[in-house]
Image (tube, rainbow, N blue to C red):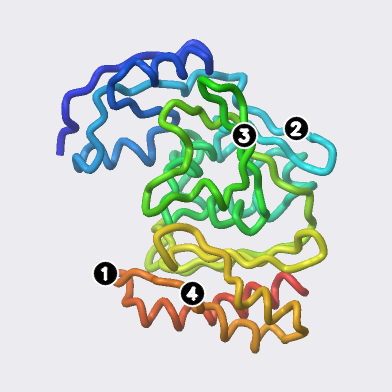
Amino acid sequence: MIPATFDYELAESVDHAIELLGDGRDAKLLAGGHSLLPLMRLRMARPELLVDIGRLSDLSYVREDGDTIAIGALTRYHDLQHDELLRSACPILAEVIGTIGDPQVRHRGTIGGSVAHTDPASDAPTILLALDAELVARGPGGERTLPIAESFAGFLQTALDPQEVLTEIRVPKTSGGAYQKFSRRAQDWATVGVCAVQVNGGVHVGLTNMGATALRASGVEEALASGADPAAAAERAAEGTSPPSDHNGSAEYREHLVKVLTKRALEEAQS
């Protein structure tokens, strides 16, 4: 289908983008476009104004910041996949980013776009949730930092203010981790995905496509903290979830699959 009529503005800076977002029209930010444009073609999104921030090169970087790695929101997947600092300081994120879509997608898609879009079938939000990532956003009132868990407002909904621009993502340094994903075809969205990663002395488990947003498997984490082995802990993977039923699988199928993938991810992360 053809998108509804919209106006287009090219932002020259973050502050300019914030100004454009506040001009009274229903405005959306455009970076790589891989999340927003398909919705516009289906007319599930009908913004009056697109504010293009894709050329703001100062929001594309990976750098060390104490015990964390700071990632510019407009850093493209391809650059993250091959960044030496990220591959050494947080290899699980670089590895998973390298499995998203195909080379064309990875050369255009941005990590910030994925986080702001909050698709529950997307891999990046799940990994970042398991890592306890922090988001930095800037709006008319200045800059603020919030945990990624607080940024999920619902299906394809973010808690970021309509005039805020996501500028940075901060992840902890960690050496371990694993991501198990099942898809019907190569490069498809995940039917179910599970991330297991060591953070702050404990194991965090994130789930893809098991609810309206990326989720933490709190039951699994509690079981592991109590001394359960991967197989026993994985039996609690579906607790508190609400997986969809669609052409890729029923909710019951996903509830079974998430247990299998959780066990595999835990065993891989601990090996």
Q: How busy is the neighbourhood of tag 3: few (under 14 within 10 Å), some, or many (20 plus)?
A: many
Residue at 16% x, 30% y is: 4
Quadrant of image for the N terminus:
top left
Whole-percent x, y for residue 109 in the image: 47, 37
Check whether the beta carbons of the residues at disc 4 and disc 2 lie within 8 A of each other: no
Of residues 169 and 174, the one nearer the viewer is 169
Disc 3/disc 2 C-alpha distance (Å)? 15 Å
20 or 250, which lies in front? 20
Asked if disc 1 and disc 3 are in contact, CB closer than 8 Å, the reply is no
The numbered mark, 2 or 1, whose residue comes first in the sequence reads: 2
Circle nearer the viewer, 4 or 2: 4
Which mark is drawn over residue 136?
3
- Residue at 46% x, 68% y is 192
Q: Which three-letter amino acid code belongs to the residue tagged 3?
A: Val
Would residue 174 appear left or right of 78 to someone viewing this image? right
Q: Gap in Å between the C-alphas at discs 2 and 1?
A: 41 Å
**Disc 4 marks which residue?**
240
Query: Label 1 vs label 4: CA separation?
Result: 23 Å
Query: To which quarter of the image does residue 163 belong?
Result: top left
**Residue under pointer 1:** 247
Mark before the other along the chain sequence, 4 or 2: 2
Classify 100 as above or below 185.
above
User: Label 2 belongs to which residue?
Assistant: 63
Q: Earlier in the sequence, mark 3 or mark 4?
A: 3
Q: Which tag, 1 or 3, sits closer to the chain's start?
A: 3
Marks 3 and 2, the one that precedes in the sequence: 2
Q: Amino acid at mark 4?
A: Gly
Please state the horizontal and vertical placement of residue 22, each as a whole percent of the image: 38, 19
Q: Circle 2 — which element?
A: strand
C-alpha separation, residue under disc 3 versus residue under disc 4 = 28 Å
